[in-house]
Image (cartoon, rainbow, N blue to C red):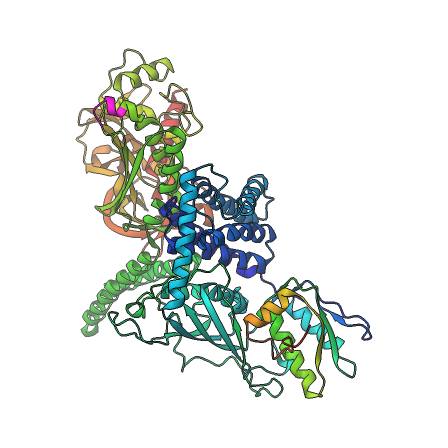
Amino acid sequence: MSLDLDQFHATFFEESFEALDSMEAALLRLDVGTPDAETINTIFRVAHSIKGGAGMFGFNDIASFTHTLETLLDELRAGRMTVTVQISDGLLQSVDVLRAMMQATQKGQPFDPVNANALQTMFKDLVAAGSAPAAEDDLEALFDSLSNAANAENERKLAAATATPRWHIRFRALPELLNRGNDPLRMFEELAMLGTLEVRCDLSRMPSFDEIDPAVCYLAWELELETGAKRDAIDSVFEWAEGDCELEIRRMDPPAPEAPAPVPAPVVAASPVAAAPAPAPETPAPAAAPAPAAVSVPATPAAPAPAAPAPDAPRAAVNESNSIRVAIEKIDELLNTVGEIVITQSMLSQLAARFEGVHADRLRSGLAQLEGNIRELQESVMRVRMLPVGSVFSRFPRLVRDVSNRLGKQIRLQITGEQTELDKTVLEKIGDPLVHLVRNSIDHGIEMPDARVAAGKPAEGTVHLNAFHKGGAITLEVSDDGKGLDRTKLFAKAVEKGLIDPNAQLTDDQIHDLIFLPGFSTAATTTDLSGRGVGMDVVRRNIKELGGNIELKTELGKGTKFSITLPLTLAIVDGQSVAVGNETYIVPLVTIIESLQLKPGAASQLVGHGEVFSFRGDYLPVIRLHEMFGVPARREELHEGLIMVVEGDGKRAGLFIDELLGQQQVVIKSMETNYARIDGVGGATILGEGTVALILDVPGLIRLAAERQVRKVA
Amino acid sequence: MPVAEAMSSPFPLDKQCTVREAEAFKLVLAAAEDSSGDFVIDGSAVERIDTAGLQLLLGFAARLKLTERRLVWQGVSPALRQGAAQLGLADALGLAEAA
């Protein structure tokens, strides 16, 4: 019987994808020729960690690829090779390859090894070519390499002449350490790469052989590390073991005089050392020799020893565990339960309203307080689901770099508002539409450098990504200082494609809106980036599906700005409850324009359009909700009830309802999950009295009403 | 997975001795121990070993020691030697003096 490691794969993949994001960000900071040593170390550590994890889980292709990558990075780290453009590009491609490999492995799908093999061959050739950057016939790079090698040698001499900081590390595995894919051996290998490591193993908690659980680590270690590396580098070795070990790291020698006094505080330890449960079995270790074994493991030859020790004291508390990783399903369950509590509380409040007597007021007062507390609880749970939009924005530096290079354009990416938070589900779905908009800005918006200069602009164009909260929603903006949309060309293209009548009188906004039509493209030549006319309509549809909206503002010669407005969450909605017959429906507030009462005779029948009424110069169709949902009507005459003017997908209509009930925030229950998809219905919720109310999908409802009207006419 | 062979020949460790194989490794080691005298083990084929694998060998060595027997290494691969050294277990496993 072997230990089932499959259950830890998800964590490995999740952490590896995050690590790859860090690696990519570090690579984008990497300066060709004069790279920052810490940046290379960061990249190296990611590759090394992924290699270790992949090896442990038996993902041999990933382990092999990262091994080759690690070898190259080791050469760079040691200063035996310099970072050239070829290497920088290759390393970035390796991030893509690794992502693809992990995605395929995660899904259990075959992986096309062509790119991986090509990169591996290139990396091996580069390393085999030795410490010289022979791959680039570039004398400057060669001199840089020699200079770096000399600097590295000088640094090594200097490091030897000065006292290198020593660190004392106490590490004890907690029972789940091995089970979670962490291996002390791998961690110590990483430590050894930072400098000279002495290891003493404490065997005192080893049980007898029969009592050993092979998946539990009973060992503890005292380590002494001599390194010029920063404290962060040491901490990061144990990063993935956080919560599964007791760890204490302290500096052994006094710091430099100007540095603040060191704080010998434990870091990363998820539980206080003294209070931590002992993983040892009940019986003492009778067999294993308790005498600690000591060994000095030399540093990896490639590991450079920077001369200046970094002050570390202020960092003492930085890496303390202050976050946990929780499955989104658990949070959703919590949210769902809170939703149920809201319903129960509402039922109790309604019941309490019927009570009279001395205690009734106190009961109602208590329930009012409970209502406030529950609302706070609901909001707190909602906040747990919120993530900074920066996690989506972080993919764009790479995208802009790659795409602008391919097109020969000079583009600066500006990112603001990346801390703005958005529901995780919305965040995951907004990535692709944003990618398309940014690609469009680069491809169609920003001009070639010579054209920009000729137009009196700087050769370098700017693409700006921005996010901010506004009125209970989030707005994401993608803007550029490119050439803007040409009204005349848009109109001509739409006529040519038969999308509009040549004599149509369109406002500027309506003309700009044409780019969202399926099949519309003004690009003279299509590229593989954009311009196939299959993008902007999909972008708008995806955003609409998220309950959002997209608008654009453009000025010829000045640039274009796309503004996406999204709800903060898909889990709850601010709704207006309305009565129709004996039923209650929830209309999302964002779709409501206003409610009004028509005078008798204000509505009329229009051939082919059914019942319409006049609203601010337009004629809007009337949708009688009781007819749409087949419920008995309380009021048949329009002037007896109310008309609620709503808008969805740019179309307006008047919903005929009996009366308005009240506004409330409701938890959305999926119809598809709990019953079946129903046209015109976006979901359901449970009301205070325990009945189910349907939440209207206004765009779908307007579409459905139009289709029924067409069928009626036919 | 390591495979027990006749006790006349050294007990060969497999290429992989990791947490993935640890459960089986323990059973095979326990089954292979039914002999008197020192336990000869061949670690020359080990390509990958982790803390779980080394910890089991350590426990097994301690068990032999209880009956005044030793773990005798006939072959030690670089991965095995380096792994034991890195964890500070080379002496406890008798690898320091092994060829």
x and y, in percent, of residue A406 in the image: 41, 31
In the image, residue A150 above or below residue A475: below
> Residue A415, can we see it?
yes
In the image, residue B43 above or below residue A432: below
Quadrant where the C terminus of chain A sits is top left
In the image, residue B77 above or below residue A701: below
Residue range corresponding to the magenta coloring: A452-457
Query: Quick check: A191 left or right of A511?
Result: right
| Residue in front for this viewpoint, A328 or A166 | A166
Q: Quadrant of residue B67?
A: bottom right
Query: Quick check: A86 left or right of A384?
Result: right
| Residue in front for this viewpoint, A326 or A302 | A302
| Residue in front for this viewpoint, A405 or A96 | A405
Query: Quick check: A661 left or right of A543?
Result: left
Residue at the (20%, 37%) spot, across then down: A594
Q: Quadrant of residue A115?
A: top right
Residue at the (41%, 50%) spot, across then down: A21
Residue at the (44%, 57%) spot, across then down: A329
x and y, in percent, of residue A244 in the image: 46, 70
